[in-house]
């Protein structure tokens, strides 16, 4: 794949940005658009199915699947912020994105990505309570508690998104050439022509502290979870517990490691396949894999999907709360 570069321009009043073009050859640009279209449709379909089965099947109206539904919403949002624009640019043989469009892209992407991290942390806590303190699960993970947690996730993501966006665009830009297929903060900071970009560096460090804290919390939670799981006398119980925990741990590790490398390392001055690879891993791969990971190893999700795709009637029992605790679903 050829990454087309262009010499920067000296412009302190940038009205639009030029995004990375995957190739100068029209056929390759069309191929890129088609590949992104397939990836986008697969991601949207998978996450919409997760949302649909959780909403329609009352047996999935538990805290674990409520969090999973919100994770699917975040994944839909994050990939929809960047992929459609890239496809349209490739098909129309253009590279530009307006200044306001770039601001919106940075803001929305940060909201969804940071919310993803916080929600994955909440999901780790949910698994910890379900496996290590099953008798207290209904009290700790009540409907009100779950709503407050998710509201806190959305609010935290929004506040960090506003903070990152305002600090990124506070400095004037000396160039409008972004060496990435979307408006990525590390690439934008290279284009600034004042020391104000150090504000965003400080904000990034601040966000890294939160990310590190979430990672430590999840690691400690899973150390305790695996300690309890390994002591279970039932092989089926151990298998069920691991099937709900390992996918979550894999997704979080891949997402955090690739995102940290992309944002904390110094980006190349020229278009780089390495920068492109890390950006695609943290922005495109998790939204695609999440539905597969959580559905392929989850019997409840597979059963609900089978009924949904079989056009069976999934009427909600009016006597069931959305947060009713299904012992078989939440406890191994």
Image: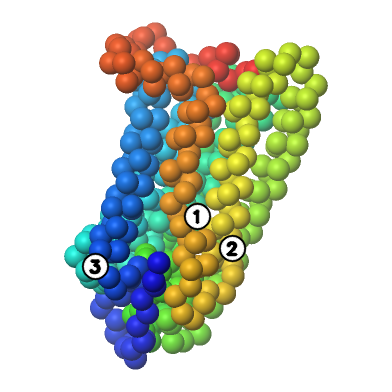
Badge 1 density bin: few <14, some 14–19, many ≥20, Cα 10 Å? some
Q: 8 and 296: which one is in front? A: 296
Q: CA distance from mark 2 to mark 3?
A: 32 Å
Q: Is residue 226 above or below residue 183?
A: above
Residue 62 in the image, given as x and y percentages of width and height = 49, 22
- The residue drawn where x is 42% and y is 81% is 191
Q: Which quarter shows the N terminus?
A: bottom left
Instruction: Looking at this view, name the residue that lies furthest to the left.
Output: 92
Q: Position of residue 208 (x, y in %)?
A: 60, 60
Could you tell me which residue is drawn at 33 percent across and 89 percent down? 9
What number is the disc on residue 261?
2
Q: Earlier in the sequence, mark 1 or mark 2?
A: 2
Foreground mark, 3 or 1?
Answer: 3
Disc 3/disc 1 C-alpha distance (Å): 25 Å
Measuring 58% from the left and 53% from the top, which residue is drawn there? 256
Which of the two labelled residues, at mark 3 and mark 1, occupies the earlier sequence position?
A: 3
Q: Is residue 199 left or right of residue 284?
A: right
Q: Position of residue 254 (x, y in %)?
A: 58, 49
- Which residue matches tag 1? 281
Q: Which one is closest to the eye, mark 1 or mark 2?
A: 1
SS type, badge 2: helix
Name the residue that disc number 3 marks. 26
Q: Mark 2, residues whose alpha carbon is within 10 Å: few (<14), some, or many (≥20)?
A: some
Above or below, 171 relative to 216: below
């Amino acid at each position: 794949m050829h990454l087309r570069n262009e010499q920067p321009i000296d412009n302190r009043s940038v009205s639009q940005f030029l995004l990375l073009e995957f190739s100068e050859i029209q056929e390759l640009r069309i191929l890129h658009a088609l590949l992104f279209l397939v990836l986008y449709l697969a991601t949207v379909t998978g996450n919409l199915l997760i949302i649909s089965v959780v909403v329609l099947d009352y047996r999935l109206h538990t805290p674990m699947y409520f969090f999973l539904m919100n994770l699917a919403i975040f994944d839909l949002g994050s990939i929809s912020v960047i992929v459609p624009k890239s496809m349209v640019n490739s098909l129309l043989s253009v590279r530009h994105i307006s200044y306001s469009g770039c601001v919106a892209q940075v803001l929305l992407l940060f909201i969804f990505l940071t919310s993803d991290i916080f929600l994955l942390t909440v999901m780790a806590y949910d698994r910890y309570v379900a496996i290590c303190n099953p008798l207290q699960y209904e009290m700790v993970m009540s409907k009100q508690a779950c709503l407050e947690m998710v509201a806190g996730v959305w609010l935290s993501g929004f506040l960090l998104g506003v903070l990152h966006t305002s600090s990124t665009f506070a400095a004037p830009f000396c160039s409008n050439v972004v060496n990435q297929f979307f408006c990525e903060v590390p690439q934008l900071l290279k284009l600034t022509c004042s020391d104000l970009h150090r504000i965003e560096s400080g904000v990034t460090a601040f966000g890294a502290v939160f990310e590190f804290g979430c990672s430590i919390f999840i690691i400690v939670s899973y150390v305790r979870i695996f300690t309890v799981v390994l002591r279970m006398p039932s092989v089926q119980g151990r298998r069920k517990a691991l099937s709900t925990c390992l996918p979550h741990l894999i997704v979080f590790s891949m997402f955090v490691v690739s995102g940290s490398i992309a944002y904390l390392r110094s980006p190349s001055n020229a278009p780089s396949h390495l920068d492109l690879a890390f950006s695609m891993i943290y922005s495109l791969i998790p939204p695609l894999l999440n539905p597969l990971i959580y559905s392929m190893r989850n019997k409840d999700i597979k059963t609900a999907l089978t009924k949904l795709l079989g056009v069976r009637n999934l009427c909600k029992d009016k006597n069931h709360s959305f947060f009713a605790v299904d012992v078989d679903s939440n406890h191994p």
